[in-house]
Image (tube, rainbow, N blue to C red):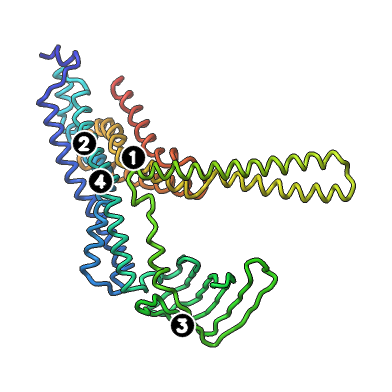
Amino acid sequence: MTQKFKNGLISKTIFWYIFRETLFAFAVSFGFFFFIFFVNQLLLMAQEILSKKVPLNQVARLVLFALPSIVSLSAPFATLLGSLMTIGRLSSDNEILVMLASGLSYKNIFLPTAAVGVVVSIFSFIANDVLLPAGTIQFNRLYRSILVSTPALEIESNSVKKFKDTIVITGNVSEKNISDLLILDKTAEGERRVILAKEAEFSDAGEEGIRLDMEKAFIHSSKETERADYDYSSSVFLRYRIAQEDLIQQVQAASPREMTSRDVYKGIKKKRETVNKELKSRIALTFEASSILETTLKKGPANYYWRQRNNLLTVYSREKELTLNARKDRVLSLYLLEFYKKFSLPFGSMAFIFLAVPLGLFAKKNGQAVGFILGLIISLIYWTLLLSGQNVGMRLGYSPFWSIWFPNILCSGLGLVLCLHRVRK
């Protein structure tokens, strides 16, 4: 029998034993992370919604629709924690040593945990690709209905809010008082306005939306086409209204988070076509500007031609910059980041398995406790890298693929190195 094990056969008894142990540890870890993310969601609700006296039953429904997001986040980290605790306990209790001494290979340890990782990855992908978009859609619909009855939800301290053609920038918000209010909007006649007020008071105007009563307001208005033609005035009292339809429109457009991976991919194809058309147009304009510039340079340094050269150089630089910006379309980057995230986060469970198994084998004493602490540290690092990747991918224009997949690749790479080191040892 020992010789068969050495030839690479798998013990079904050991397989199901480790599988059940890992699955049980995963369930416990999942409950732990689910509780953390759930409490975090409740705290956000308390800060943004409960404080505005929204009915409790509507808050409960919002929490319910947010559950798919909590599940999709909890599952991968629970896989890491569960695997580390299981392998760490088996290692510290010398059960793995006994298995190896009996002729069993490391396959009998890795395959059961990998099987749990595959099951969790599939379950997490379904939650992330099907349940999460459905939950987000229902969440936004309910939030829109709450906005109709409680428009003041959109007024927060030190925030920037965009409502159709209006941007509202607020300082501190206390009760219904706002300090340092700034409003940028566009009138029906096409004029741009800047409205400033040191103090303001907001109130719900029912179906009319939000009403802002400002004291000692300053108003600056200018025409869209003639910025030099402007007017300014001051007012002892000014009432400003944000229409209800503008509030609802803000959360009405479907975001990539509300779509399945297939729908996001279709959106990426459409946006790439749009970006490519704009890019071709920009390249043509840049080429034309550079050709004219080259022709002008050949005509000598006369003052007239020198001025023409400077003007054309400015045009060329502007077109070149616009061309580079077209390559880094922010909306396209957002779609790509969300598309890769729909796969990277669920299948992060497999990356964690590659890392957790060799790390757990190094445990000598108190394997479960060590695995639990190590799992929390790795989860924190992974989450930090994921959030950082999203930020640099969106703001700095880095590759969306590497921005999102880097944490998984790093975990898998470290795990493979540790696996090779353990096997050779």
Residue 325 location in percent, x, y?
Answer: 58, 47
Q: Residue furthest top?
A: 3
Q: Check the image and name the residue furthest to the right.
A: 302
Pinpoint residue 416: horizontal percent, then vertical percent: 34, 27
Give the image quarter of residue 9: top left
Task: Residue 220: give x, y in percent of width and height.
Answer: 61, 76
Q: Residues within 10 Å of mark 1 (few under 14, many from 20)?
A: some
The residue that mark 2 highlights is 119
User: For mark 1, what is the residue?
Assistant: 343
The residue that mark 4 highlights is 127
Please tell me which of labels 1 and 3 falls first in the chain: 3
Residue toward you, 42 or 85: 42
- Mark 4 residue type: Ala
Helix, strand or loop at mark 3:
strand
Give the mark nearer the N terminus: 2 vs 1: 2
Q: Disc 3 marks which residue?
A: 213
Asked if the residues shown at circle 2 and circle 1 are in contact, with their CB atoms under 8 angstroms apart, the answer is no
Return the disc, 4 or 3, that comes first in the chain's sequence. Answer: 4
